[in-house]
């Protein structure tokens, strides 16, 4: 039996927070009559750390949260009060796990949405680790697939039609790709006919989505077996 969760998160669900987008400008020579080229860099944080830990996120000693801490299987858009820059450090704090930091090493010179995913480093430690993905603006729907599951169980992620009967497309972990508009199912399977976790997925043109395999198996005890979808 599978022991993971799938967190499906799309930009559409955070559209109301569009005013949070920050802009960075390309420097121009003083006195130039040209206007600076502005790029929108939006930061979103996802909590894939199994359990009840909620993460506070700070930058430069100041909170960049829009409200409550980021709960497990939740993504939030950060409230940046200044443009995101290379070298910026995001500090993550929770009640029962060691504090950790994520450094932004580079940013693209185009409009983009950056997802930072905090997850457990391993079954034998409470320490956290990070994965990230940068989405460029595109006309088609985009999907990034990340694996944050802690344990030895193997599984494959599949893209099926809305009925789940056609399973012809494997979604390799650690990849990103375009998806035609339409209604699908995301299926997490260990290869057996019975052991499958399914999530409905609607791809909308111009939107970006992140799919996370998450969960924990520790000492043969499964601590997460829920399928969660958030659009």
Image (cartoon, grey):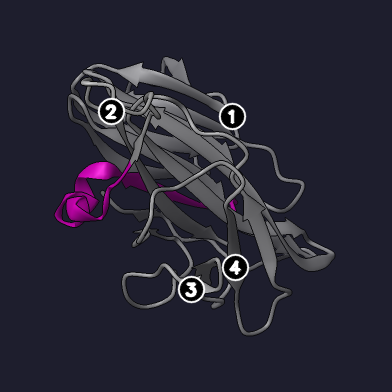
- Helix, strand or loop at disc 2? loop
User: Label 4: how many residues lie within 10 Å, few (<14), some (14-19) or many (20+)?
Assistant: some
Disc 3 or disc 4, which is closer to the eye?
3
Residue at mark 1 to residue at mark 3: CA–CA distance: 31 Å
In the rendered structure, the answer to whether residue 4 lies left or right of residue 162 reads right
Q: Which residue of the protein is positioned furthest toward the bottom in this rendering?
A: 95
Is residue 147 visible in the rendered image? The answer is yes
Q: Are marks 4 and 2 in contact (CB under 8 Å)?
A: no
Q: Which residue is mark 4?
A: 92
| Place of residue 78 in the rendered image (x, y in percent of width and height, measured from the top left) | 37, 59
The answer to whether residue 44 is above or below residue 114 is below
Q: Which residue is mark 3?
A: 62
| Place of residue 46 in the rendered image (x, y in percent of width and height, measured from the top left) | 47, 56
Looking at the picture, tell me which residue is in the foreground, 208 or 31: 31
Q: Which residue is mark 1?
A: 174
Where residue 129 sits, quadrant-wise, is bottom right
Residue 29 bears which disc, if any? Answer: none
């Amino acid at each position: 039996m599978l022991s993971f969760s799938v967190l499906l998160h799309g930009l559409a669900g955070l559209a109301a927070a569009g005013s949070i987008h920050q802009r960075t400008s390309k420097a121009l020579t003083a006195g130039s009559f040209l206007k600076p080229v502005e790029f929108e860099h939006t930061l979103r944080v996802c909590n894939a750390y199994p359990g009840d830990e909620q993460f506070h996120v700070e930058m430069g000693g100041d909170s960049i949260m829009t409200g409550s801490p980021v709960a497990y299987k939740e993504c939030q858009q950060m409230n940046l009060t200044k443009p995101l820059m290379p070298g910026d450090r995001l500090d993550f704090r929770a009640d029962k796990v060691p504090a950790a930091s994520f450094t932004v090493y580079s940013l693209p010179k185009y409009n983009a949405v950056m997802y930072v995913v905090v997850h457990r480093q391993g079954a034998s430690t409470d320490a956290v680790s990070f994965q990230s993905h940068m989405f460029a603006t595109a006309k088609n729907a985009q999907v990034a697939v990340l694996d944050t599951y802690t344990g030895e169980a193997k599984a494959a992620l599949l893209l099926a039609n809305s009925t789940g009967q056609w399973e012809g497309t494997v979604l390799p972990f650690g990849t990103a790709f375009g998806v035609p508009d339409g209604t699908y199912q995301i299926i997490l399977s260990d290869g057996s006919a019975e052991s499958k976790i399914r999530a409905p997925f609607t791809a909308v043109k111009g939107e970006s989505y992140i799919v996370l395999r998450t969960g924990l198996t520790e000492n043969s005890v499964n601590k997460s077996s829920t399928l969660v979808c958030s659009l």
